[in-house]
Structure formats: structure tokens, C-alpha cells
Amino acid sequence: MNAPRVTLANVALRAGVSRSTASFVMSGRGAEMRISEAAQQKVLKAAADLGYRPNLTARSLRTSKTHTIGLISDAIATTPFAGEVIHGALDAALAHGHLLFVAETAGNEAVEADLISEMLDRQVDGIVYATMFTRYQKAPAVLSKVQSVLINCLDPTSSSPRIVPDEYQGGRTAARALADAGHLNGIYVIGGRHDIPKTPGGLYAGVNRMRGVEDELRTYGAGVVLSYECEYEPAFGYKATTELLSDGHRPRALICLNDRLAFGAYQALGERGMRVPEDVSVVSFDASDLASWLRPSLTSVALPHYELGKIAVTTLLDAPVRKGGESKDVLVPMPLHEGDSIAPVTPVGQIQE
Amino acid sequence: MNAPRVTLANVALRAGVSRSTASFVMSGRGAEMRISEAAQQKVLKAAADLGYRPNLTARSLRTSKTHTIGLISDAIATTPFAGEVIHGALDAALAHGHLLFVAETAGNEAVEADLISEMLDRQVDGIVYATMFTRYQKAPAVLSKVQSVLINCLDPTSSSPRIVPDEYQGGRTAARALADAGHLNGIYVIGGRHDIPKTPGGLYAGVNRMRGVEDELRTYGAGVVLSYECEYEPAFGYKATTELLSDGHRPRALICLNDRLAFGAYQALGERGMRVPEDVSVVSFDASDLASWLRPSLTSVALPHYELGKIAVTTLLDAPVRKGGESKDVLVPMPLHEGDSIAPVTPVGQIQE
DNA sequence: ATGAAAGCGCTAACAG
DNA sequence: CTGTTAGCGCTTTCAT
């Protein structure tokens, strides 16, 4: 930016060869082009002496590849742990020698369109478009005309690959964690499908997790006693649990649809003098930092943010030209993060058996 | 990326003017260059018809300005709420018509050097270098040779502007919040300067917050009863508070050095049946999401992440050529986020007054 | 007021 | 095996 930039021409001159020779050597195709060993060394030395660094924008103009990709989202950096998506995307990009433009639309479509143009004008090699949480939503139309991948965005009309967490399996995993500890009775759900006026029918994550939970429990001939539908925020977890208890319910296990709900549930349980996991086992979703901070630490099914970002970029960069071809969705597993919030059920009255 | 790119030449051709004329019009300098109104309209129309978009990499090659900047950090995306730094940087960049490369080094110096090169090779107009938390640390040497700004990184030898939170004032603010509610006695500190074997002498944030706390309390002729030095994590907040209580201390107010410590303190207080804020008032630092999730919500002095990012980019882009000139540090205010964790002290025995 | 021409730094035919 | 040449798409003197 300050020092007088050293160019390939300088290197060639100093090495006493032509620019093309220098170019081939520098791009590692010296052998392939059968440049003499002597010439190669001269070029390499000259480059090293001069501290030569190729001007990638100039190269891009020629090759029309910038080794740059864009990550655009409605609120990826803002939302706490989803910064992991960036992290995963970055690692994958770096592994492919690419750099990452990151941008946020705050849900504003005008901003979104602008940002995409801005990236395209800079000739990015592809775009990853991510929504904060999984949902059915149309992706910007332009994206179908360029190399792109969707994260969490289930646009049914898009031909771009879609990367989403495997919420259904996640639901099964959560239920199995409980069942494995012997919990088949007194299981309550906090949060449910998120079926509230604001989101009638529930959220994608809620709906699929609940399907998973129910299918898995059915396997054991068990089921959920009650599912409390509400927003996935601490205050509602607190409220739901408090009401449950006030209504005379005595849950042995709580499935909270995310860690924040579980956090609220912990508070309510604590106030009632009920201990986790001795009195009530709790399993949750997200595996955020919160889960590890809680006492006892929370067993939680992780949202694979890092993987989502990484797989998206990998898919984007490894994608064959794929025009009009079917692009299969990628379901990313949600692993169980074990905490101390599940206790084995003590078979009361069966101790003699 | 797919459609045959339309170039300025195409536009000029269709408008029946030369490439230079088209260029002037498209860059908004038509009037200045006194291009005829008729010609201007023709060019604009042709561009619109063709859906012309300038190739910014080509332009960059000519102008040697890419209108991109790099944001590089040890763990910016990963750490939960610091994603706000990206957010602020992004907003400022966008306002200046720039795009943002984001990268993370994970503390690895080799990766760091590589990332910086990678950005420089792509001719970024400047680099923002951020460390996760404020500390004395040498910034990469290359940065002094390019347009750059430091966030949280107090490199005494660097000539780049340094943007840091005003921790000292933050400390005063926290103490004042307590004092304003009448708390001048029974004030305990959890976390302190973070003066533990791993970080002898404490952390920059801890040291300066504590200076602020003490200076402010002194104003009222008050002081801290005891400061418990420990790591800023929930488990230590829990441990510290538990020990305090076991040792017979009866704090009326707790100053926790961050929200996670306060979280741990809440847990310990709750187990002892002590209510916040009736029995103990609590004030903290960070103003993370956690603060609002806690019951009662936590009064906390905010780390101005968004502002740090925004100011850094603004400084970078508005910076005059500044060579060797003194670059003043920017201290960013830490505002108080009021919660419900501070109760006014009831002047026992003075009710008759 | 407009056009011709040069060149940013690099790659890639094509000659030699 | 190596050098010459011609652009990539754009900006910017310099003539006209």
C-alpha cells in the first residue's frame, strides 16, 4: 500500500528472463512448462530478494477468478453463537485459498440486493446465503444465476444446494438421551413446535425436533405427557415450568426446545426447590455456552453451526458446474453434548426385582 | 458469473459514444467533464438496457483502490457477542462503499501472517486488526507499513490508531450505579483485576475497571470491603460468592467483573436463599445477552463492541495520509445498561429522620 | 465536448 | 525451453 509495489516484470528483469517465464515459475507450473532448473532458481531468488507478491486483482482480471467468496446473511454476526458459521466458512475458504467477504442484511431486502451486487461487482467466485435459523423463505433471485449455496434457507424454488441441520434426528437424539437413562414416563416438553400466533404451525426446527422426539419415544412405547407451546426465550421457559408445577404436574424429565428455555426452566425449578437432575432430568437443544455455564451443566443437542458454514463453502467450491441439475439438500447431524442434567431413573418399588 | 458479462465497451457501442465518454458518465463525472446532456442520457439508457455493472476488479487495477478492507482477529467471530465488532465494522464499511474481508487467526501467528498477506495481495485498502480483549500485545509488523487500525490491541510501538473501550470510566460508572442507589458499605468485588498466576498483575480491563471503581467510591468516602481475584468464568463467580458467604461475610452489593461471574454469583446467592436485589445488589460488566436473561435482569456496564468496529473502520477510511504522525488512541465509552439487580439501600434506623 | 491511445499487472497463446 | 505479443475491463491523459 505504501512501498513501491514490486511487479512480476521487476522479478523477470532481475532474474534475466521474460515475464512469461517468471509467471510460469511463480505459479508453480515451472516444471510442467519445462523451464530449466537454473532459470527457476533465478526467478525464485529474484522474487525472494525483491519480496515479490503477486497482485491478485491483476491476476483476477485475466483469469476471472478472484479466489474470493461472499457470505451473506440476515444476522449472522449479530446472533451470538452463529458466529461459528463464519468460522466454519472461513476455515473451508482458507483451505481452498479463498478469502471471505462477510455481510449482513438485517433482514432488509434492499440492503440484501445491494450487498449481493457489491459482491458480484467484485467478481466473487460464489456466494453463501444464510438465514439465521432454518425456515422456508425465498432466496434472492440473482443467486440462481451465480454459483451459490444456501444455509438454513429452504427455498423450494432454488436450484442451489441447501445445507440445513438434521433437526429430526436431533429430536430423536434428545429423546434417546432420556430413554437411555430410563426415562419413559413423566416427560414434558417446553417450547414445542413454537406454535404461537406469530409463527402459526410452528418453526421448522420445532416441528422437526418434535417429530423426532415423538417417533423416538414411540420406539419405546413411550410418549410426551404435555407439550407447552411458546417462544424460545428464557422468560417463557420460566413461565411454562412455573405453570406446569402450579398445575400439579410433577415432571420427571423436561425436553426444552433450546438452551434459553432450559435456562428459564432451571430458574423456575430452583425456586421450587427442585433439583436437576435428581428430581428432574433436563435435555435441550443448541449446546450453546449457556449449557456449559448452567449448574449442573446441561445436556444439549448441538446446532452444528461450524459445520454448516464449512460444508456450505466446501460444497460451493467443490461444486461441479451443475447447471439445472438436481442439487440434493445436505442434512448436517446434530451431535449430543453431554452435561450433567440427566440422571438415571431409579426404579421405585422394583428394587427387590 | 454465468451470463456473458457486459462491459463498458458494449455500453459505449450501443450508446454510440467512445469508451471514455461512457466511463465519465458512469462514474458520475459527466457534468464535470461537460458531456452533452444528450450523450449522458444515451449512455445511461444503454447501461440500463444492457444491465451494465462495472467490473470492480478491472477498475481497481487502474485506480489501485479496491474499496475493500480486511478485518482480522484472533477470535472475533467465535467469541459470542463480539460478532458485534464485525457488525459495526460492516456498517461503517458499507456507509463508505466498502466491503469487508473477515478472517480469524485463532491466535496462530503463522496463520495471521498468511491471512494478512492474502488480504494485501488482494489489494485491500486497509486492515483492522482486533484482539478479543484489550491487552498489551505486539501487532504484526507489516501492519505499520499499511493503512491500519488496531482494536483492543495496545501495541506501544505501533503507529496505528488504537481503539479501546474506556475501561476506567466503565469502572467509575459501575461504582456510581451502586453509589447512586445509596450503596456505600458492604461492597464486594468478584473477579478483581484477574490477578491470577496465568495473568500476573491482572488484565488490562480488570486493572482499569478496578481503578475506576476505587476512584469513584473514594469520591463518596467509600471503598471496597474485599476483592476476590479470579478468572472471569461462571464457576469462579459461584465459588467466590460461596466462599465469601461461608466465611461469614454479608455483602450488600457485588461488583462482578463480567456477566459470567455474575451468573455464577446469582447461582450461589440463590442456593443460600439470598435475593437479588433485596438482599444483595449486583452490578456487572459486558451487558451481554446473559445479563438480560438473568432473573432479575442484571445491571451491567456494556462493552461497546459495535462501536469499536464502527469507529475502527471509520477511522481507517477517514484517516489522512498520516505518516509517522502521532496517532491518538480512541477511548470508547462504556454505557450502563440498567437492569433490576440494584435496589436502593433502606437506611435502617433512620426512618424517623 | 468527444475520441484515440496508453497502461494498471498479470496470463496465455503462439512463435521461435 | 524461452521470449513476444495480445489482451482482461477500466481510467485517464492528451489531442482534436
Image (cartoon, coloured by chain):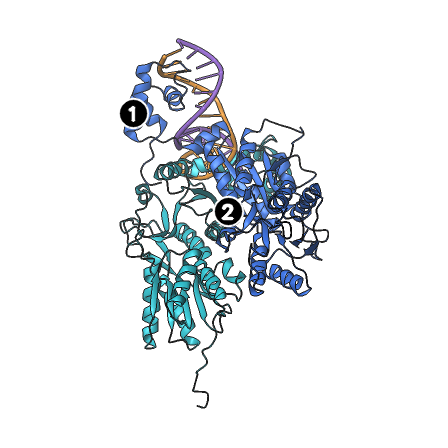
Chain colours: A blue, B cyan, C purple, D orange
What residue lies at 32% left-to-right and 23% top-to-bottom?
A: A44
Between the residue at mark 2 and the residue at mark 1, the CA separation in whole angstroms equals: 42 Å
Label 1: how many Cα within 10 Å (few below 14, some 14–19, many 20+): many
Image coordinates for residue B129, horizontal then vertical, percent: 38, 47
Asked whether residue B58 appears in the rendered view, the answer is no
- Residue mark closest to the camera, 2 vs 1: 2
Q: Camera-side residue: B176 or B231?
A: B231
Q: Residue furthest front?
A: A352
Q: Is residue A91 above or below residue A75?
A: above
How many callouts does the rendering have?
Answer: 2
Chain of the residue where label 2 is placed in the rendered structure: A
Q: Return the residue at label 1.
A: A46
The numbered disc on residue A262 is none
- Tell me which corner region of the image, top left, top right, bottom left or bottom right, holds residue A243: bottom right
Image coordinates for residue A97, horizontal then vertical, percent: 45, 32
Q: Camera-side residue: B261 or A310?
A: B261
User: Label 2's element?
Assistant: helix
Q: Is residue A60 above or below residue B174?
A: above
Q: Identity of the amino acid at label 2?
A: Gly
Chain of the residue where label 1 is placed in the rendered structure: A
Image coordinates for residue A330, horizontal then vertical, percent: 62, 35
Q: Camera-side residue: B158 or A254?
A: A254
Q: Identity of the amino acid at label 1?
A: Ala
Q: Is residue B258 above or below residue B250?
A: above
Image coordinates for residue B193, horizontal then vertical, percent: 33, 60
- Tell me which corner region of the image, top left, top right, bottom left or bottom right, holds residue A130: top right
Q: Residue furthest bottom?
A: B352
Q: Return the residue at label 2.
A: A83
Q: Is residue B56 left or right of residue B43?
A: left
Q: Camera-side residue: A177 or A109?
A: A177
Asked whether residue A5 appears in the rendered view, the answer is yes
Label pair 2/1, CB-CB below 8 angstroms? no
